[in-house]
Image (cartoon, grey):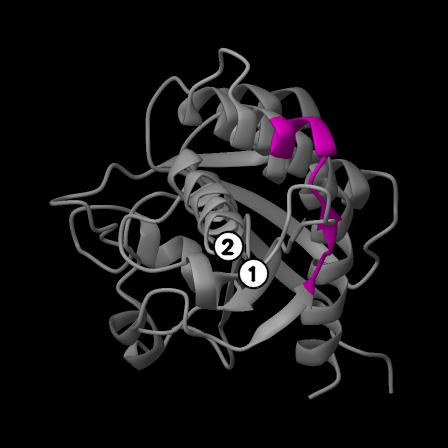
Amino acid sequence: MEDKKVRLACIASGSGTDFESIAKAWKDGWIPEVEEIVLISTKEGVGCLEKADKLGIKTHVIVPVNKELPLVSPENDATEILKRIDLIFLVGCIVRIPILLIRRYPMTRHLSIYNIHPADPHEHGGQDMYGLAVHEHVLNQILDQIKRGMKTDSDRFYTYPTVHEVTPEYDKGNPLLRGCVEISSDIITELVHGGGMNLEDLSERLQKHVLPYEWQILPTAVRMAAKKISEE
């Protein structure tokens, strides 16, 4: 019997480059397990909506209340959207998802939810750990290791963008797919010896360095998650 095709919703809050990596791969036929993709944006007028429009992906805007996205609420159409969804990927979503409410709601036979975290979520995750805050935490950990003599600035350092399951606790879900990205030596040198760049500047450089690796692993992670659902 042929495996069932999966319907995917991506939830984003910003420029949408992670979403775009999934949507382009799907458009190119590289994610055959997925039948349909929709984008849910938590903000009006952001880049993810423009990217979805260019790719012909259906979009919905659902603005959060008190930093929590009201995915099942009579005040919006999210309930109807999610009745057709099997899989959710959080791709640059910076609001809390009421995961327990979603999983109790009788919308679909199965609803799996995953998040992309730009580093190891168990070491660099938790509440308010997203965007530059994550990369700054990675660099502070490296600087601490060097200052305490556990490593030297000539050692090789790595960061681990990870796709993981979403659970009620921030960043505690099981990993689905993890990348391994070497941090460039010039970032480490400037971190330790100065060079005129502050920690925020270096975090931005690390973010730009890691993002292309996120774009590589996300389509693969979607395929893996979709296959798990379609083969159940």
In this orientation, does residue 16 appear?
A: no
Cβ atoms at labels 2 and 1 below 8 Å apart: yes
In the displayed orientation, state which residue is furthest to the left. 66
Q: Magenta stretch? A: 178-189
Give left or right: position of 124 versus 78. right
Residue 162, position as x, y percentages in the image: 60, 59
Whether 188 is among the magenta residues is yes
Classify 46 as above or below 86.
above
Rendered residue at 74%/49% (across/down): 156
Q: Which residue is mark 1?
A: 150
Magenta span includes 179? yes
Q: Position of residue 138 (x, y in %)?
A: 49, 47
Amino acid bearing label 1: Met
Percent from the top left, x then y, of residue 9?
A: 53, 52
Residue 145 is tagged as 2
Q: Nearer the viewer, residue 178 or 195?
A: 195
Location of residue 232 (image quadrant): bottom right
| Camera-nearest residue between 202 and 26 | 202
Q: Amino acid at mark 2?
A: Gln
- Residue at 65% x, 42% y: name it: 153
Q: Residue at x 35, y 77 (%)?
A: 103
Instruction: Find the residue positioned furthest to the top.
Output: 196
Dot 1 crowding, Cα within 10 Å, few <14, some 14–19, many 20+ = few
